Image (cartoon, grey):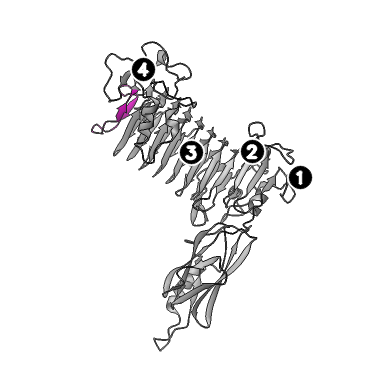
Amino acid sequence: MKRDIKLNNFIMPIFLGMLVLISLSGCKKDTNSFDPNLALATESLSVSNQANNYSVDMVSNLPWTAESDVDWITVNPSSGEKGKGKMTFSVSKSEEDERIGTITISTSADYKKQITVTQESGLSADMYVKVNGTGSGMSWEDATTLSNALKLVPSGSTIYIAAGTHVPTEIITGGDSSVDGDITFEINKYITLKGGYPANATEGAEADPVNNKTLLSGKLPNGSETYHVVTVTAPRIEGQKVVIDGVTISHGNAGTPTTSANVNGTNFRRDYGGGLVIGNAIVDILNTEISNNKSAKFVAGVRIFGESIVTMRNSKVHRNISVSNGGGLWADNSTVYIYDSEFTENETPGTAAGIHGYPDANIYMYNSTVANNKGNSYGAGLYIRQNSNAVLVNCLIYGNITTSANGGGGIMMYSNTKLDLISSTVVDNEARGPGGGIYRRADVNELSIYNSIISGNAQASGSSDVAVFEANAQAPLVRSTVIGSKAYSQSGAEIAGANFNVSSMLNASYLPVGADNPALDNGMSGSELNSLANTFNPVLEAFISSDYNGRSRSGFTIMGALVQ
């Protein structure tokens, strides 16, 4: 099936040359007389089976009109003035076989050009994949390879994947066929990939990702590795999403070239994201592990960019290693929702070993763990930077280490960021600089802490579990929280006589225990947390009234991620 293409920024070099020629041509001695000239960026394109809008860059030396020969293509506006511009049109959703229409653009009665529009089939065509499959993909008995299924399947379909190691064979759109690194599993349509089926699956087989490991591997037969194991290039369409469910993504290795493959006007850099890269797309990542990927430069595990919207549930980003910034996940100008997931043992000699939000990122994380990530600069666990925001609810942040004097072992905030930490536990993190738990630096970084425990973190002498670089920085909002050995009431006042001892008042699972423990009696109730949730825009989710393990907080006033 042909790829869905939006051509907002797609102008071939020859087209640019034609623009110059058109501006100079057609001029006769009679200055009111012109030879008609019209250049189009493309004269054919393939589109999704979903309703969407498209445009084609064009230049004309005369006014023009455009019309379609089919009712499922609507040109609007249907006319335009001379000069450089765009011809825009929309297509309606298809529930038919593949169909073809023609848009005719005219500058005079005898001068016309046409654009052929091919819309992929709107009929569901689920496909079945096994390692080394040689069939059509229409059943388990006639299974095909994953690379072949990704080429053939139409939007709205599901690819069912049997256990085993699947290796990509196709070059990314706009890639270099002579470079092994550009080989990837490219998802360019809004489809579902569902793994976890038995290796010898037959009709009626059920998915079990735990026992039927479905590995998408970037390690090629010749021993080289792909820049990105999985690349999601499906252009964002409201109401449509890619779903990746029940697979393991490993052995990618983002390269050193700073060049990009341009897909639908989005640049997919070769040096970002060894495991999974998502650009300008809407994606759900479910029951999936992204592990043991590398990067010769930036972010080894997952890169999310270009105003993407990603939801991650019950997934794991684990043991990804970068030689520069970004170990586990990097969200760039995107929004990420994370539930019941883990970010563990990722490494980088730079910043943001676990999770990086930079720039202009929004991260909402519920009931999740960021643990044992190791870096050598700011923010070993979670690092938000430059106009990024994060909301953490019922999260465990522990064992993260930065060996640099820069600070920020558990959480780092830098340059106009906002963090709301709610019912979370930040302990046993280490920074050789300031702020082993949370550190703020540069410009205004707004920190609000509710019903949380931040204690037992290691930092430079003279610093504290929650620290800030600027002497005149605004104080954090603290409600019903333990910081270091001190406990604070719901009004934010220090509780007289209260003393928190992390070694005796948290057990090995980070559950508050022991006599005279202020974290047991001074926390927020489930109803109070629900009221807090309603002060946010958007309103925080109902998970806020339960703990990390989903146990109701009703009847408890316990700080931190766990109530029992």
Circles 1 and 4: CB distance less than 8 Å?
A: no
Q: Which residue position is annotated with label 2?
A: 215
Mark closer to the chain start, 3 or 4:
3
Q: Which residue is mark 4?
A: 521
- Crowding at dot 3, Cα within 10 Å, few <14 / some 14-19 / many 20+, comes out as many
Q: Which residues are magenta?
A: 461-481
Q: Amino acid at mark 3?
A: Leu
In the rendered image, residue 312 lying in the magenta stretch gets the answer no
Residue matched to label 3: 329
Quadrant of the rendered structure where residue 123 is? bottom right
- Along the polypeptide, which appears first: circle 3 or circle 2? 2
Query: Is 31 in front, or is 494?
Result: 494
Crowdedness near tag 1: few (<14), some (14–19) or many (≥20) residues, C-alpha within 10 Å? some
Say what secondary structure mark 3 lies in. Answer: strand
The alpha-carbon separation of the residues under discs 3 and 4 comes to: 36 Å
Which class describes the residues within 10 Å of circle 4: few (<14), some (14-19), or many (20+)?
few
* Res. 376 in view: no
Which of pointers 1 and 4 lies earlier in the amino acid sequence?
Answer: 1
- Answer yes or no: is residue 215 visible: yes
